[in-house]
Amino acid sequence: MKKKALWVFVVVWGIACLWGSRGCLEQERMALLVGNKGSNFNCCNWEYVECNPTTGRVTELMPYYVGSKSWYLKASLLLPFEELKSLYLSGNCLGRWIPPKEPNLLSSKLSKLEVLDLSVNSLDNSILPVLSTILTLKHLFLNNNYFSIKNMSHLENLYLGGVHLKDVATVLRAIGALSSLRILSLQGITIEGTITAQGYLAPLTSLKLLSSSNSDLSGNLSDHSLCNLVKLEQLDLSRNRITGRLPTCWRNTIRILNLEDNEFMDSLTSSPIASLASLEFLSITGNHFDIPSSLSPLADHSRLKVLFLGDNNLIIDTKVASSIPRLQLKVFRMSNSLSKGFKVTSLSFLNHQYDMRIMDLSSNDIRGPFPAWLLENNTKLEMLFLADNLFTTLEVPSRTLFNLRVMDISNNGMRGELTTKFCANVPNLDHLNLSANGLEGNIPSNLGSIKSLYFLDLSSNNFSGGLPVQLLHSNSSLHSLNVAYNNLQGQIVLPTDTMCPNLSDLLLDHNRFTGNLSFLSSYVNLRVFGISNNFFIGKLPRLIANMSNLVALDLSENQLDGVIPQEFCNLGLLNYLDLSYNNLSGPLPSFFISKLVTHIHLNRNKLNGTLAHVLSNSSYLVTLDLSENEFSGSIPHWLGNLSQLSILSLRGNSFDGTFPKQLCSLKSLSMIDLSENNLFGPLPRCLGPMNFSDEFADKVNSIPHIEAGFIPWSPWSYVRAIKSHTILDRNEVLEEIWQLPHTVGFTTKRRFDFYKGYALLKMVGLDFSCNQFSGEIPPEIAILQDMLVLNLSHNNLTGQIPTSLSSLTKIESIDLSYNNLTGPIPEELTQLNYLAVFNVSYNNLSGAIPSKYQFGAFDESSYYENHLLCGLPLSNDCSTTININCSATKSCAKAKEDAFIDGETFYVSFGVSYTTVLLVIPVVLFINPQWRQGWFHYVELVISTCQSSFVTCYYYVQDSFRKLSNC
Ligand SMILES: *[C@@H]1O[C@H](CO)[C@@H](O)[C@H](O)[C@H]1NC(C)=O
Ligand SMILES: *[C@@H]1O[C@H](CO)[C@@H](O)[C@H](O)[C@H]1NC(C)=O
Ligand SMILES: *[C@@H]1O[C@H](CO)[C@@H](O)[C@H](O)[C@H]1NC(C)=O
Ligand SMILES: *[C@@H]1O[C@H](CO)[C@@H](O)[C@H](O)[C@H]1NC(C)=O
């Protein structure tokens, strides 16, 4: 196996070299070729080789993907590369490095080798003796391997990130012996045991950069921690759990200090930071620092350019600095500080800033008018984040802000109009987010003349009038346009032959747009398209078949009619499809090609025909809602193959036949609604193996992630430009930016914030009501232990209520009404502590009604028309038998409504449960605003379904239910 890998390695080099012409040195060529002596080639032309242009000698080698299994490298192969400076062998599955026979050969031949990258391989300690013979080595990357280091006192840079270390003390002692070390990166290291004795690093007096980010450090830094590191310039201790105060001994050499996401508890005024006047970059985000709003302790830090202070405790001090602070920042982030509701003017140092490039004050509940003066003072500003505050008006900056590219003032509640003048003064924007404000009037058409505009979010305002055609113009670079939740109206008419190849995400939902969808012919590259809740009419355009990028399509709640064209099946990337609440008719197209489709909502249309094989290939399907259509025939067996299916609703169709036993193989099902059909025969006994899901959260998360469409900017690249330092990884910073505190823009009919953070709801329920199922209730049904809701009402069930129902310990609602059940109500059911709704009316039950526990709370409506039942709450004593008089049999639907708890409780539980679900997935949703919109919309839709039928919602009752019904 190892031979084979080596052979691949050599041959790959060889073949690559064959294409060149003679040029590199003979023996190097030989080394690369081994068996192919005499061929004409120039190694230097090969993309994995870098040569010195004058000598023609190889200076850099970076072979990739040499093997996919562990292989050994013979070091003697490298001997001809005498001028080699850098050797990159990262990620090559390298298992061992076999040294040449003469111990000093390597160091004498590879006398120029300075950079050796062996990271992400499967090397172990056996490499170390080999490495210690290469005396020239300055940069050694060993991260993501399996070993530790010793005897390398000449080493200057050591990157050990991702290594798992067993014995902390030994390791740190070994590191401590590397007295030449200048850069030490322990980022992401995992250590068994805790690093308590920071003193181990004390001998590293040459250390300039120490990164120990995310490396599991805890406890206090003692007053002496890192005191010996007299040359330290860059220190990164971010993402650990270090507590307490900062050591007092840190020196003025430190330029870059990153302490974010720890548990430091200190006051900025008295901490040593106040005297670290050489600081250029400082992040203390996410600690417990007390920070005076005047920033007076930093007033003299004239070199400080990047300052991240968020998630700390801002202390408003009214103290006005006697002199003008020398602090002049370029990047300032102070989002989500713990003292909310102050005024921008409390940050008095801002008055003196005129060189800002990036400013982030989001999520502080800052009050008052929009601080346009900040923009005027800082004409170089490129990015402004003021989301989640309480600014009242949107003021027009009085001068043109040529540099402003990103502006996010969403979720502020600002009133007034977005004026033409405003848009004219920000001519180079590429990202504008004004969503969730109270802006009104027309959308100014000159927004369309901002040529660079890439991302525009005006959703959730009160904009009226039409959508300016200029925004949708052919030469617009707009990539993402969201105007959902406004009062926009009119038709969307574009000049014929307009093509907008750039537009990828278009959200028009919750407006009053009219007309048909023919404008879609201009947007063949759309990825996300949502028009839910408008007045669009006409047929679904066949050209949707050409929109091969389409991932999410939401056309719900319009007045679209006609059939679903066969062409829909061609959408190979389609993932989310919602056509519910339209007037679509006819059969479903025969096959959906997209195997990725996870959520399909076709409910409330007039679709008919049988289901044949429509979705039999869609093995990722999680939600299938076909309720309230006119489908007929039997329930298709192929549903049993959709192993991810979690929610299945076929309610309100004309399905007939018996329950297909194939459905019993659905291991992930958490909600199944077959009510209001013509199903007959016995209830399934095979439900036993059916494992109602515990894992709905995972499913929701498994929505295949749409790549975030918008990251044209990166604050990090900017920070990097002004200060090139190596501590932080770009992606980490980006990720953090994307996690800027956000509100879940989720409006339900009721919102109950105090349920935030509750455990994820497990929506589990079974509704077979309003069919003609007959026979007994199979005792096996009790195996569905997570069930919250069971509804078997309005069938033709006979026999007794199985005592086994008492093992459904989580159940909150049981409805068995309108059947032909006989016998007593099992006393054991009183053990069901969460039972809030119980209905057995209109049966032939007999005997005494249990009265213990929950059963004391049920009134007589639970028991109507069971002539042989007796005891409270009925008026007949168990010693006599008197029939209670009750109204005649009601229609199925009406009776069901009556039978259920009042709507209020039910909205509450529903809203709450979905809120909880959503709170668990905000990251996915936040990364992609379109998904967020789509998902929230989806949720709302389900909620509006509830208005017309309590039955659906019934499934969403959650643990909190009990609390609610008790208060
Ligand atoms: C910035 O704006 C404030 C408020 O208008 C003003 O008081 C201050 O002098 C300005 N600072 C500079 C440097 O222009
Ligand atoms: C489906 O509905 C259409 C009208 O919308 C009707 O013409 C057709 O016969 C129906 N098909 C079935 C199988 O019911
Ligand atoms: C209900 O069941 C009884 C007895 O099994 C049968 O006679 C009757 O026809 C059934 N009713 C319906 C509506 O299926
Ligand atoms: C109820 O069941 C009994 C016998 O089990 C049967 O005689 C009666 O017809 C049934 N009633 C209905 C309404 O199906």
Image: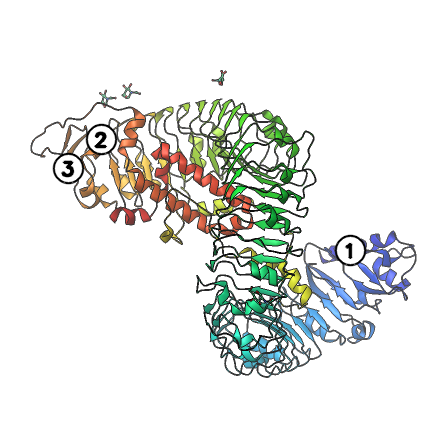
Mark sitting earlier along the chain (2/3) = 2
Q: In what element is the residue under mark 2?
A: loop
Q: Residue 841, which numbered label?
A: 2
Amino acid type of the residue tagged 3 in the rendering: Pro
Q: Is residue 878 left or right of residue 347?
A: left
Q: In this rendering, is residue 754 above or below 907?
A: below
Q: In which quarter of the image is residue 954?
A: top left
Q: Residue 7, which numbered label?
A: 1
Q: In what element is the residue under mark 1?
A: helix
Q: Name the residue under label 3.
A: 873
Question: In the rendered structure, are the residues bearing label 2 and label 3 in contact, judged by CB atoms less than 8 Å apart?
Answer: no
| Pointer 2 local density, CA inside 10 Å: few below 14, some 14–19, many at least 20 | many
Q: Nearer the viewer, residue 271 or 811?
A: 271
| Pointer 1 local density, CA inside 10 Å: few below 14, some 14–19, many at least 20 | some
Q: In this view, does 452 lie to the left or right of 918?
A: right
Instruction: Select label 1 or label 2 by which is in front.
Output: 2
Q: In this view, does 607 lie to the left or right of 873?
A: right
Q: In which quarter of the image is residue 859?
A: top left
Q: In which quarter of the image is residue 776?
A: top left
Mark sitting earlier along the chain (1/2) = 1
Instruction: Select label 1 or label 3 by which is in front.
Output: 3
Percent coordinates x, y for residue 715 in the rendering? 62, 59
Task: State the separation of the CA atoms marked 1 and 2.
Answer: 80 Å
Q: In this rendering, is residue 935 above or below 42?
A: above
